[in-house]
Image (cartoon, grey):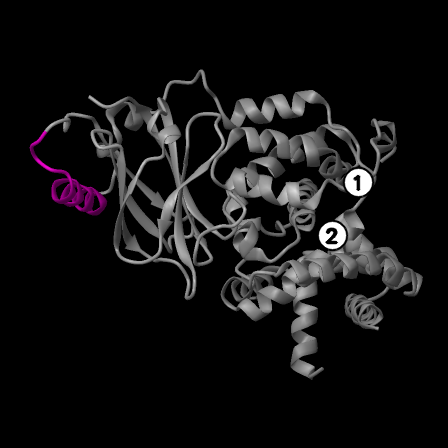
Amino acid sequence: MTQSHDDDEMLAAELALGLLEGDERNSVQRRAASDPGFAGLVRGWETRLSTMADLPPVTAPPSVKAALMADLFPETVKPPIWKRLGVWQALTGGAMAVALVLALMLTPLSGPNTTGPLYTAEITSDIGDFRVVAVIDKSRQEVILTRTLGGAPEGRILQVWAHGPDEPAQSVGLWPAGESIRLPLPPDIAAVRGTLTLGVSEEPPGGSLTGSPSGRVFGTVDIANVTGAG
Amino acid sequence: MTEAKEGDREDNAPPPQDRVEELIARVSLGERAALSELYDLTSAKLFAVSLRVLGERQSAEDAMHDTYVKIWKNAGRYRVTGHSPMSWLITIARNTAIDRLRARRNHAHVGDYEDTLAAPSQTPEQATIAASDARRIVACLDTLPEDRRAAITGAYLDGQSYAELAEAAKVPLNTMRTWLRRGLIALRECMDR
C-alpha cells in the first residue's frame, strides 16, 4: 500500500462516514463524482460500514407507505398545465425541431391509416449526459427515437423499455447502434391507454438477460393521455 | 431510543437479493407496483436504520418517506454505483436519517445520494465478496480498542462530527482524527487478513 493510496482510503472512509466538512468535503465530493477509482473506494467503505446498520427489522406503520404513495402518485391532482397543453409545447426548441424533422422524415405523408395521433417526448438523464427525442406514431404503432446527446458506453448497447399505468415494464427493442432507430410497439404497449412510460437503459450486446434493465437507466418519460390509432 | 424496541419485530431473514435487485431495476423504469413491492420487502430493515439513527418514531417515519422518494428517483443509478442492493438501500436510509439528525443539530448535510456516484459496476462475484467483507466488519470492529470503535460507530450511526467525537472522548480534535484513522486502517487490515 502506498502512502497516497492510504490517504485516499482514509478520505474515502471519512466521506462515507460524513466526517468531512466545508471546502474539504466539497473537493472530496467532487473527486468522488469524477474519479471512478476513488468512487470505488467510497463505495467500498459505504458497503463495509452499511453492515453496522444491518439491524433487526422493525415494521413501520402503514400510514408511512400510504403517505409515500399518495405523495409520489397524486392521481387525483390535475396534470400540470404543460401536460394539458400537450407534450409539443413542453419540448425545448431544439428537441422540438428534431422531433418535427423526425416525424416528417419517417412518417409517410399519405397512404392508408396515417391518421393516428403522434406523441413526442424527450428522455433526459438527471445529470445531463444523455438525451433522446422519441416520437410515437400511433398510426403505425411505432416509436422512433433519436439521440441528441450521449449514448451507450463502449461495448454496450441501448435498450428501449415501456409500460402502461401500473403495468410491468417490457422491452420494446434493442438499439445497438446509430443516431436513430424505429421500433414497432409490442402489442401490450400498443394497447396502452392513458399514461405511457418510455425509458432507455444501457445493456450488454444482445440486451438485458433478466427481462428488466440490468445496466444504468438513463431516464424515463411519462406521455400522458395516449389514445388508440385513428 | 427505547421506542425502537417497541416496534413489531419480524424475522431477521434478509430480503432476497435477486428479487430486490430486480425490483430496483423495475423501479428505475417508473413501475409503481415494483416500488410498492420493494417497500414491502425492505421497509422494515430501513425503518430499523432510521429509528436507530434518529431515536424517535416521528422523525424516523419522516426520514423513511424521504428515503423512498430518493430510491424512486435514483433507482436508475443503482448499477452504476457498484453496491449490493441492500447496502445501497441501507446507505441511502442511513445518509437520509443522518441528514435529518444534523439538520436538527444545525450541521452541514452529509450529501444527497446523487452528489457522488459512478464507480465501476460490480460483477456478481464482487458483490458476493463485498457481502462477506461486510459480515467481517462486525467481528473486526470488536477487535478494536473501545475508544476507536466508539468513534467509528459514533460517526456512522450517530452522525457525530470530529469536534463532537473529540468532546465526548475529552481529547483534542487532532487526536480524535488520528484515533479514527488508525481505527479505520486496523479495520481494513483485519478485513484483509
Which quarter shows the C terminus of chain A? top left
Q: Position of residue B67 (x, y in %)?
A: 62, 38
- Residue type at mark 2 is Ser
Question: Does residue A99 sit above or below A157 in this rendering?
Answer: above
Residue B52's label in the rendered image is 1
For marks 2 and 1, give the CA distance: 13 Å
- Give the residue at the far left of this rendering: A110
Question: Does residue B75 sit above or below A71 in this rendering?
Answer: below
Comparing B141 with B25, the one in front is B25
Judging by the rendered image, the residue that carries numbered circle 2 is A50
Q: Residue at x 73, y 28 (%)?
A: A60
Q: Which quarter of the picture shows residue A134? A: top left
Which quarter shows the N terminus of chain A? bottom right
Characterize the local packing of mark 1: few (<14), some (14-19) or many (20 or more) Cα atoms within 10 angstroms.
Answer: many
Tell which subunit mark 1 falls on: B
Q: Position of residue B13 (x, y in %)?
A: 81, 40
- Residue type at mark 1 is Arg
A139 lies left or right of B97: left
Comparing A123 with A171, the one in front is A171
Q: Nearer the viewer, mark 2 or mark 1?
A: 2
Question: How many labels were placed on the picture?
Answer: 2
Q: Position of residue A171 (x, y in %)?
A: 42, 41
Question: Does residue A122 sit above or below B163 in this rendering?
Answer: above
- Indicate the secondary structure of the residue bearing disc 2: helix
Comparing A63 with B99, the one in front is A63
Q: Which quarter of the picture shows residue A95? A: top left
Q: Residue at x 24, y 29 (%)?
A: A138
Q: Which residues are magenta?
A: A93-111
Question: Does residue B183 sit above or below B117 in this rendering?
Answer: below
Q: Is B76 inside the magenta-drawn segment? A: no
